[in-house]
């Protein structure tokens, strides 16, 4: 969901919840969904050492969501999204630019054999997204989003395009709890597959891994979940705790590449835990 929903979606919805705490009535749904609120979050994350690795590393995690006029800005990992269209109503169109970094195999690798392969450049990826969001399907504050991302490496790494269709659903469960879930897939070119997953004859001499020629296509699918708990009992402001987890599965030649089949795992996990502040 790229349409800005404040502070990891910061509201609750049902009449039953309103009856539980009548002393703090909820603002109208339109005010919540369009509020000019900023959330800054930070914590620690766990991610595979490289895409396809069975080794993991602990990294700092940070996220920002804000709204400037009708423009919603949010970060997703090392990528920044800016939603330039906010039409309002129960159906909202999403459109805007994306920019970010892909760090895959661009530094020291824990696996001694994979580390013998040539180091990859950091990919500088820019592009855009388009989609549609449906609001108020189960309550006044939920959102179902369908989005297509496309980014291209403009640097000196894979020099190709990655296309990612995504479905997101998000809803509050109470005044203090918000949850979300997502499903996505990555489609890549032969050039991307060759850059990150092929093993050339020279690579075989250097590492002992078998030579392998990877082809493009559907690289992986991913499912994700997010939970946010407000420490103040008001998700629209103050401190909150967030946790997220993602599981992805490599497919086809990406799964069969020696750096995955012989040295790593096609099953990939990522998670983060931290604190956020909304103002």
Image: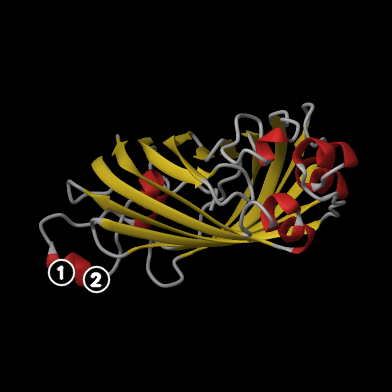
**Residue at mark 1 to residue at mark 2: CA–CA distance:** 6 Å
Placement of 124 over or under 227, stated as above or below: above
Q: Are marks 1 and 2 in contact (CB under 8 Å)?
A: yes
**Which residue lies under the disc numbered 1?**
19
Placement of 260 over or under 237, stated as above or below: below
- Quarter of the rendering occupied by the C terminus: top left
* Residue at figure coordinates x 44%, y 66% from the top left: 136
Q: Is residue 148 left or right of residue 37?
A: right
Q: How far from the left and from the top, in percent, is residue 33? A: 41, 51
Tell me if mark 1 has few (under 14), some (14-19) or many (20+) residues whose alpha carbon lies within 10 angstroms of its own: few
Residue 225, quarter of picture: bottom left
Q: Position of residue 151 (x, y in %)?
A: 73, 41
In this rendering, would 246 be left or right of 146? Answer: left
Residue with the mark numbered 2:
15
Q: Is residue 91 left or right of residue 196?
A: left
**Residue at x 56%, y 38% (from the top left corner):** 110
Helix or strand or loop: what does disc 1 sit on?
helix
Q: Nearer the viewer, residue 171 or 166?
A: 166
Residue 134: image x %, image y %?
54, 63
The residue that appears at 60% across and 44% down in the rendered structure is 85
Residue 56 visible here: yes
């Amino acid at each position: 969901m790229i349409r800005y929903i404040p502070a990891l979606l910061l509201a609750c919805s049902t009449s039953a919840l309103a009856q539980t705490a009548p002393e703090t009535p909820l603002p109208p749904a339109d005010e919540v969904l369009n509020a000019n609120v900023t959330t800054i979050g930070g914590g620690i994350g766990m991610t595979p050492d490289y895409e396809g690795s069975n080794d993991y590393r602990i990294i700092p995690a940070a996220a920002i969501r804000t709204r400037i006029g009708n423009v919603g800005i949010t970060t997703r990992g090392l990528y920044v999204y800016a939603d330039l269209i906010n039409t309002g109503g129960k159906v909202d169109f999403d459109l805007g630019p994306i920019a970010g970094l892909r760090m895959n195999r661009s530094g020291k690798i824990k696996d001694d054999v994979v580390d013998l392969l040539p180091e990859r450049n950091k990919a500088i990826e820019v592009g855009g997204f388009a989609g549609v969001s449906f609001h108020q399907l189960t309550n006044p504050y939920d959102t179902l989003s369908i989005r297509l991302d496309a980014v291209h490496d403009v640097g000196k790494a894979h020099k190709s395009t990655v296309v990612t269709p995504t479905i997101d659903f998000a809803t509050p469960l109470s005044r203090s709890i918000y949850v979300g879930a997502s499903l996505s897939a990555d489609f890549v070119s032969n050039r991307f597959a060759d850059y990150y997953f092929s093993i050339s004859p020279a690579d075989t001499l250097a590492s002992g891994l078998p030579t392998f020629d990877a082809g493009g296509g559907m690289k992986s699918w991913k499912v994700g979940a997010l939970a946010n708990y407000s420490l103040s009992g008001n998700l629209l402001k103050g401190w909150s705790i967030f946790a997220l987890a993602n599981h992805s599965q490599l497919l086809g030649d990406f799964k069969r590449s020696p750096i995955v089949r012989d040295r790593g795992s096609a099953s990939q996990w990522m998670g983060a835990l931290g604190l956020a502040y909304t103002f």
